[in-house]
Amino acid sequence: MESLKEKKVLVSGASIAGLSTAYWMDKLGYKVTVVEIANEPRTAGGAIDIEGIASDAAKRMGIFKQLESNRLNLEMIEFKNADDITEGSILLKNEGAELPDDHIEIERDKFVHILFDKLKNDVEFIFGGSITALNETKDNILVTFKDGKQSEFDLLFGCDGIHSAVRRIRFGHETEYTHFLKAYFSITIVSKLLVKQKTMQMYGVPDKAIMLNAYNNKTDIVFCFNSEKEIPYDYRDEERQRKIILEQFEGLNWRTSELLKEVQRSKTFYFDKFCQIKMPSWTKGRVALVGDAAYCASPAAGMGASLAINGATALADALQKHNGNFELAFQDYNKKLRPFIEEVQATAELNVRENFIPRTEEAIRKRNTQAKLF
């Protein structure tokens, strides 16, 4: 791989997909630059799961032991009714039982900081920057940044999430690839326990669901609701998004009123539609998309972080196999990862419809009283 040492690659996005891609490209010998629109690595969001082949990738990356020492140990899922009575529960871990080594739940910011610390001395980071234009030639790709500067790179990796700017500029408008799952969600993280530590609680009425997940003296508050039609809003307009949640859940029983007050007060709030990105190809010329930008499966999959790590690793393995020939490597990446992505996306669609936001009282009772992992 000696020939790669003079080659430059740009990674757009400093979240899980971007940092994982940057790690592997640096490992292969490329000169790596990461551009991120925020002023620091992306850490916002709920706890994440690293499982299956993503666990193997984490071992190859040399971060598995650190992940393991910071893992969360969810012990119980409880299904509540309007009177706060537990109608069913799932015990996830018996006292003294060994934890699996192929599935780790960890706080998103912990994972991001572990990987960022591993990279920060070897990779160039441009924070507060973004890509505004691309011009690809036979020999390279000319990137224009928002400050007007231009640089040439051999390859560009769009790891900039579901609303990817790289995808929009190089592949076309977001609407061409978005598959709406007819539901919305919000995540609010508060620095206190609203339920017992290491416990998840779920409550629902037809077409609406609330979930609490407590760990490390924090609680994730998740609101989900079905919607046949897409709701018009600017994804940057956080106040409008909070208002949508308040309007949808106002007047609901259980602890809803208390939780909506937390949503209004909290500084950490994220809202989006349950949707998937489906593309005939994740690559075009010298550009490849990784993670949510290419194949978002939605939070209903519980696999976003794992897919990002898997995608970055598959891309790196393909480039190594073809000794840096990106055309052949990108063909491999598109072909070999696709069956797995399609399987995860199909499972996520089913989860939204049947498990996350049941549509009838009967379905809610069945889920609560015949509780099983989905």
Image: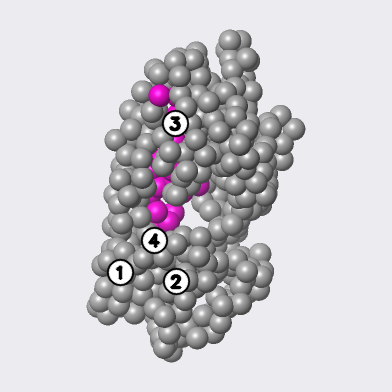
**Which residue position holds label 2?**
223
Between the residue at mark 2 and the residue at mark 1, the CA separation in whole angstroms equals: 13 Å
Q: Amino acid at mark 2?
A: Phe
**Among the two numbered marks 4 and 2 on one chain, the one whose residue lies closer to the N terminus:** 2
Q: Is residue 35 left or right of residue 210?
A: right
Residue at the image point whose x is 65% and y is 73% from the top: 192
Q: Which is more toward the observer, 204 or 14?
A: 14
Whichever of callouts 4 and 1 sits on the residue coming sooner in the sequence is 1
Q: Amino acid at mark 3?
A: Ala
Q: Residues within 10 Å of mark 4 (few under 14, many from 20)?
A: many
- Identify the mark at residue 288; answer none if there is no mark: 3
Instruction: Please give left or right for residue 338 compared with residue 189 in the image.
Output: left
What residue is disc 4 on?
273
| Label ID, residue 227 | 1
Question: Residue 100: x and y, percent?
Answer: 53, 48
Q: Kindly indicate whether the residue at mark 3 contacts the one at mark 1 (C-beta within 8 angstroms).
A: no
